[in-house]
Amino acid sequence: MVPRTKNKAIFHVRRNASVQRTDRSDKQNYPEAKGNWVDELPGVLWAYRTTARKSTGESPFNLIYGTEAIIPAEIGEETLRIQQYKPEANGIERRTWLDEVRSNASIRAEAYKRRMAKAYNTRVRPRNFQVGDLVWRRSDIQGNLEKLDAKWEGPYQSQKQ
């Protein structure tokens, strides 16, 4: 007996175009790192941790340590930033500055959450159901759903809770 195979689409037409452009640029920019992604991981994590976030306006590194990260190129060279560093005065200033930065980041994060909630709520239509209305419920079926399988169950009659 020969097992039957199901035909599945290899190319997803409705995939996000910006993701496709990003994937293409990554492949073009890093063809030599194809099998060496483990070696590239520390640099990628460093970039992720030192990049400012839209929600807080600060980088995670800055929120944790209270200072901007010194890039490896600055460590070997004597820059103005490193010349003016005074360890004694830095600790006290950094603690007061860190509290202020974290407070501002918290305020910005709350404002960002409100903006995201407002944007989401403009797309969602409120639905009011009366007792006895017929409603559909999203299916809880897990596993391999095919393209044309039912994603909804019902109709059910709504009841008072």
Image: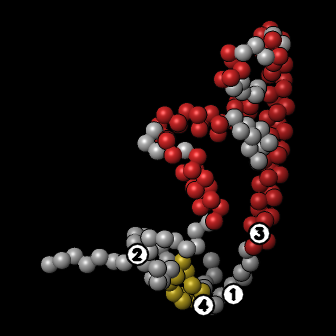
The answer to whether residue 144 is above or below residue 134 is above
Query: At 22% across and 76% down in the image, what residue appears?
Result: 3
Q: In the rendered structure, which disc, 3 or 2, sits on the residue that comes first in sequence?
A: 2
Marks 1 and 2, how far apart in space? Answer: 42 Å
Marks 4 and 2, how far apart in space? Answer: 35 Å
According to the image, label 2 marks what residue? 8
Apparent side of residue 143 relative to residue 91 in the rendered image (left or right): left
Query: At 49% across and 71% down in the image, what residue appears?
Result: 11
Residue mark closest to the camera, 3 vs 1: 3
Apparent side of residue 15 relative to residue 7 in the rendered image (left or right): right
- Tell me, what colour scheme is on the image? secondary structure
Residue count near mark 4 (Cα–Cα under 10 Å), binned few <14, some 14–19, many ≥20 = few
Three-letter amino acid code of the residue under disc 3: Asn
The quadrant of the picture occupied by the N terminus is: bottom left
SS type, badge 1:
loop
Name the mark on residue 121. 3
Name the mark on residue 55. none
SS type, badge 4:
strand
Q: In the rendered structure, which disc, 3 or 1, sits on the residue that comes first in sequence?
A: 3
Q: In the rendered structure, which disc, 4 or 3, sits on the residue that comes first in sequence?
A: 3
Marks 3 and 2, how far apart in space? Answer: 35 Å
**Discs 4, 3 touching: Cβ within 8 Å:** no
Three-letter amino acid code of the residue under disc 4: Leu
According to the image, label 1 marks what residue? 130
Q: Position of residue 128 (x, y in %)?
A: 72, 82
Apparent side of residue 83 relative to residue 127 in the rendered image (left or right): right
SS type, badge 3:
helix
Query: At 71% across and 39% down in the image, what residue appears?
Result: 51
Three-letter amino acid code of the residue under disc 2: Lys
Marks 4 and 3, how far apart in space? Answer: 24 Å
The answer to whether residue 155 is above or below residue 2 is below
